[in-house]
Amino acid sequence: MQFIKNNILTISGIVLGAVAGFIYWKYVGCLSGTCMITSKPINSTVYGAVMGGLFFSIFRKEKKKTI
């Protein structure tokens, strides 16, 4: 539970990115099937999840350690 509380921003970025990747595949996609990322829904969803997680992790604040 503590892990989820500490990483809620990154987890939400992964979820939102996965949804956005799937929606991109569904409505834009690749008609010819030769596009590496958007030719299959799993590729587009995983790529969106990774990019969403990386993007949202930028805004995470580091806790300062006191000595």
Image: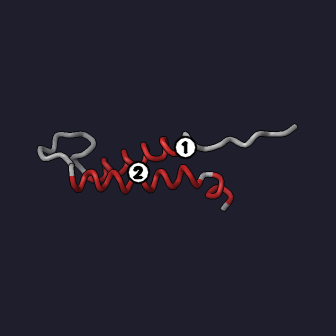
Task: Give me the disc on residue 38.
Answer: none
Residue at the right extreme of this rendering: 67
Q: Is residue 36 left or right of residue 54?
A: left
Q: What's the amino acid at mark 1?
A: Ser
State the quadrant of the C terminus: top right
The quarter of the displayed image where residue 62 is located: top right
The quarter of the displayed image where residue 37 is located: top left
Regarding mark 2 in the picture, which secondary structure is present there?
Answer: helix
Residue 21, position as x, y percentages in the image: 33, 51
Residue 25, position as x, y percentages in the image: 25, 52
Q: Is residue 22 above or below residue 61?
A: below
Q: Is residue 64 left or right of residue 21?
A: right
- Name which residue lies at 46% across and 51% down: 14
Q: Is residue 14 left or right of residue 33?
A: right
Marks 2 and 1, the one that precedes in the sequence: 2
Tell me the crowding category of disc 2: few under 14, some 14 to 19, or many 20 or more residues within 10 angstroms, Cα based: many
Q: Which residue is mark 1?
A: 57
Q: Which residue is mark 2?
A: 17
Q: Is residue 40 above or below residue 62?
A: below
| Marks 2 and 1, how far apart at CA | 12 Å
Residue 24, position as x, y percentages in the image: 27, 51
Q: Is residue 13 left or right of residue 34?
A: right
Residue at the left extreme of this rendering: 32
Q: What's the amino acid at mark 2?
A: Gly
- Name which residue lies at 13% across and 47% down: 31
- Name which residue lies at 39% across and 53% down: 18
Foreground of the two, 5 or 40? 5
